[in-house]
Structure formats: structure tokens, C-alpha cells
């Protein structure tokens, strides 16, 4: 039985190349389905994962030669995004031959035939492997039953203590001088240590320091309900400050003034996060524990199978993530989740989300801390952050321009995930209510 593959073909080059191959009566293998697209840059990574989940044994994206795109730099944008998808598949243990990205021109019918034939031959040699079952959410044979034998959750580190004198003094000065109208921090209440907004220097006497409480998402929601011209400061840990930088890059505080008063993390807290250098301008992903370092592809498949079959789809990871702030979730669109069925399988869903925030993830660990099933989410997110750093020296939260954002900006209106940040109806104000968990 021949393999089944989906080939997304650029209508300007690859599709015409396929037609030329047909006119030249070149032999083409069976089993592949061509899906014409305006540009290779118009193929979102989650559509590729959806194709795998729906039964494809391989996916190819075929576009114009680099530098010859009909939509500015759409093929370069596709190259950057699909390279990240390839890194994700490698982390999961999926065979690299299941994804093909190739570029050619309209007159190269022989090249099209050769590329497709080689791709289908490699897929035929792979057959139905365990990596496909993983992508399709088939978790039979997993070592753990859902809800059973969950890994022990470590107690929350960092008991509340008074704010450091320098942070307290600076917060008082900002409020007294009117530089900011509000300070968001933590205070001990009847319900425990919870976020609180301080509006006068006297109220700050109740403020406490307790790292490991994710405040960046709370701060974003608070500022979303405030008018333009509002000024506020956030007393937070370093990774929250980096997350606020990413939110700022996404035009979330236009017309507002935000400040971060950063508390240093304790050695105990930094160890729990896997962060070797928790300073505000230190990359946090580099020291993340890598449970997959010594695993071969089969071991990676077993690791993720046994991990993600515990997912109960509570969406806690998405709701607490400080950089997962779309006004509506693309993964709840009817294109990906038809009405009347359960959400997509856990692992493809988590892989899609990791790809969506890959260039914004600051490694804060809020997703992993919020997971009631103890999923090792930092291992997945950290692997993608590491890939971006190795390829382009990029580190999220450091004020750098994301290579993915740069590629999307250069590709023009050919398609792909639309960046709605800062546009009317974007992720501001009342739209944020849809993100409350």
C-alpha cells in the first residue's frame, strides 16, 4: 500500500511545475494530494499538524525559489516557520522524512517530479510508525492511565516576605510623584497571597514578595481595562518582566506607560524553574532541564505519549501563559475543531500552541506550574526557544526582533497567521475577557 501525503503547492510555481510535468508526461507517484495555496508563506504550521492528525503520513510544502517569491518574501517566511516545525517534530520523535520543504520554479517540471517521487519513496519506507500514532493522538499502550500515578507536585517555593527596601522605596516614590497611578503586586489576604492594586504609598505597607506567582498575565488584564494615558508599575520576578516586554512588542500597552520593578529570585526558586541565572536580562531557557537529551526517537515518542495522555484539556496552560493573549484562540476555530466534537488530540494541540508562542516564550514555567496533571511543558517550549537561539541568536523578552515576526513582516499580504496586534478589535480592552480562565 502506497503512502498518503498532502502537498501544499504554490499556485505561481509548484502548481504550474506540476502541470508542466503532466504535459511532459512524466511519471508521478500515486498517493499524494495537491492543495494549491497562494504562497508557501500562506501555510500555517498548525494546518500542517492538522494534516498529520487527519491521516497524512507526510506533508510537503513546495514554493518558489528563495528570492523569487511573488509575494515579497513569503517563501522565506515559510522557511523560518517550517524550520521551527521541523524542530518541534524532532523533539517529539517524529521522523524528519515526514516533512518536506522544497523550492523550485514554474518551468521546472522535471524537478517537481523528482522531488515528489523522492518524498513518496522515503515515506513508503517509513510506513505506519509510532510517530504517526503520536501525532494523531492515539495513545493506546501508554504506560500511565489518565489521572493515575501522576508525578508528585513540589510545594510552592518562596514564602511571602516583605518587599526589599529598595523596591519598596522606588514603588513609594513612583506613586508619590505621580509617575505611575497604580502599582500591581502581591499582598496577603484571607484567601492567601493574591494580586492587589496599590494606589497610595501607604497601601504598599501590605505588599509582599513571593516569587513563583505569575503576575504578567494579571497585569495585562488589568491594563486592558484601563484607558489610554494610564501609568502603572508591576512588582514581579524577572521572567514576568521579560513577558511584559513581549506584550509591549505586541502593542498591548499603546498609549499607556508601564514599569517593572523586578525582584530577584531566590536560589531555590531559580532551581525549581531550571533557571541558572535569573536576572532580569538573563535568558531563562538555556538551563531548562532536558529530559530528552539521551533519548532516541522511540524514547521521545514514549516520553510524550506517556506524558500527554494525562492531559485533561483544562486549558490552564493557555489561560495562565503571559504571552498567549490572542483575542480568540486560533485552535478553537471551526477549521481545526468542528462544532460538536471534543477538542483536538492533546499532543497536536500542545505542539500547535508551543509553535504559536515559540518566539515569545520566556520560560517562566507558569504553564507547567498550572498543569494539574504535571505535564513537562517546559521541555517542549524550551526546545523551541533553544532552536531559535541556535539559528538566529534570538532570546525572547530581551527586546530583540523575532526572526518569525521579521519574516512575516517581509512576506506581505500573501497569507499566513494574521498579526492583529494593535489593530482595531485586536487584543485590548473588553476583548481580553475571552481569555479569562
Image (tube, grey):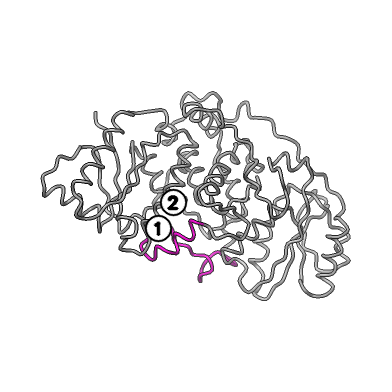
Q: What stretch is highlighted in magenta?
A: 403-431
Q: In this view, does 107 lie to the left or right of 340?
A: left
Left or right: residue 366 compared with residue 97: right
Q: Are marks 2 and 1 in contact (CB under 8 Å)?
A: yes
Q: Residue at x 54, y 23 (%)?
A: 143
* Image quadrant where residue 413 sits: bottom left
The N terminus is located in which quarter?
top left
Q: Does the magenta stretch include residue 417?
A: yes
x and y percent of residue 318 in the render?
A: 57, 49
Residue under the point 56% across and 51% down: 393
From the viewer's perspective, is residue 59 above or below residue 183?
Answer: above
Question: Is 306 colored magenta in this rendering?
Answer: no
Helix, strand or loop status at disc 1: loop
| Residue labelled with disc 2 | 81
User: Picture quarter containing residue 167?
Assistant: bottom right
Q: Assess disc 1: are there few (<14), some (14-19) or many (≥20) residues with their C-alpha within 10 Å of its C-alpha.
A: some
Q: Considering only vertical position in the picture, is 321 above or below 244?
A: above
Of residues 102 and 261, the one nearer the viewer is 102
Q: Position of residue 6 (x, y in %)?
A: 30, 43
Name the front one of labels 2 and 1.
2
Q: Where is residue 185 in the image (x, y as percent from the top left)?
A: 77, 58
Secondary element under disc 2, as helix, strand or loop, is helix
- Identify the residue under disc 1: 416
Say few, some or many: other residues with alpha carbon within 10 Å of mark 2 (under 14 / 14 to 19 / 20 or more). many
Q: How many labels does the image show?
A: 2
Sooner in the amino-acid sequence: mark 2 or mark 1: 2
Q: Distance between the residues labelled 2 and 1?
A: 10 Å
The residue under the point 36% across, 36% down is 97
Q: Position of residue 205 (x, y in %)?
A: 89, 60
Amino acid at each position: 500500500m502506497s503512502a498518503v501525503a498532502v502537498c501544499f503547492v504554490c499556485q505561481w510555481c509548484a502548481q504550474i511545475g506540476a502541470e508542466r510535468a503532466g504535459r511532459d508526461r512524466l511519471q508521478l507517484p500515486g498517493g499524494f494530494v495537491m492543495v494549491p495555496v497562494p504562497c508557501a508563506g500562506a501555510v500555517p504550521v498548525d494546518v500542517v499538524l492538522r494534516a498529520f492528525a487527519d491521516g497524512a503520513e507526510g506533508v510537503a510544502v513546495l514554493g518558489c525559489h528563495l528570492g523569487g517569491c511573488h509575494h515579497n518574501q513569503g517563501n522565506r517566511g515559510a522557511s523560518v516557520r517550517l524550520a521551527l516545525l521541523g524542530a518541534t517534530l524532532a523533539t517529539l520523535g517524529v521522523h524528519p522524512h515526514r516533512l518536506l520543504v522544497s523550492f523550485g520554479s514554474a518551468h521546472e517540471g522535471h524537478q517537481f517530479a523528482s522531488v515528489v517521487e523522492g518524498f513518496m519513496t522515503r515515506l513508503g519506507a517509513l510506513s505506519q510508525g509510532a510517530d504517526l500514532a503520536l501525532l494523531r493522538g492515539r495513545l493506546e499502550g501508554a504506560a500511565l492511565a489518565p489521572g493515575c500515578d501522576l508525578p508528585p507536585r513540589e510545594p510552592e517555593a518562596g514564602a511571602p516576605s516583605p518587599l526589599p527596601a529598595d523596591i519598596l522605596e522606588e514603588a513609594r516614590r513612583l506613586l508619590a510623584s505621580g509617575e505611575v497611578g497604580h502599582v500591581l503586586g502581591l499582598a496577603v489576604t484571607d484567601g492567601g497571597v493574591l494580586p492587589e492594586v496599590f494606589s497610595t504609598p501607604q497601601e504598599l505597607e501590605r505588599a509582599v514578595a513571593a516569587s513563583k506567582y505569575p503576575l504578567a498575565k494579571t497585569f495585562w488584564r488589568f491594563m486592558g481595562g484601563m484607558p489610554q494615558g494610564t501609568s502603572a508599575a508591576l512588582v514581579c520576578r524577572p521572567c514576568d518582566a521579560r513577558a511584559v516586554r513581549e506584550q509591549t512588542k505586541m502593542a498591548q500597552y499603546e498609549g499607556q506607560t508601564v514599569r517593572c520593578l523586578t525582584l530577584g529570585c531566590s536560589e531555590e526558586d531559580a532551581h525549581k524553574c531550571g533557571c541558572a541565572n535569573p536576572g532580569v536580562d538573563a535568558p531563562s531557557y538555556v538551563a531548562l532541564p532536558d529530559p530528552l537529551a539521551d533519548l532516541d526517537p522511540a524514547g521521545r515518542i514514549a516520553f510524550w505519549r506517556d506524558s500527554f495522555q494525562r492531559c485533561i484539556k483544562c486549558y490552564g496552560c493557555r489561560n495562565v501563559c503571559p504571552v498567549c493573549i490572542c483575542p480568540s484562540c486560533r485552535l478553537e476555530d471551526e477549521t481545526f475543531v468542528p462544532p460538536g466534537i471534543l477538542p483536538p488530540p492533546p499532543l497536536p494541540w500542545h505542539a500547535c500552541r508551543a509553535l504559536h508562542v515559540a518566539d515569545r516564550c520566556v520560560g517562566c514555567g507558569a504553564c507547567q506550574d498550572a498543569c494539574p496533571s504535571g505535564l513537562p511543558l517546559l521541555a517542549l517550549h524550551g526546545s523551541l526557544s533553544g532552536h531559535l537561539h541556535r539559528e538566529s541568536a534570538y532570546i525572547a523578552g530581551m527586546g530583540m526582533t523575532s526572526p518569525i515576526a521579521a519574516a512575516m513582516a517581509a512576506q506581505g499580504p500573501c497569507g499566513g497567521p494574521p498579526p492583529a496586534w494593535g489593530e482595531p478589535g485586536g487584543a485590548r480592552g473588553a476583548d481580553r475577557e475571552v481569555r479569562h480562565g
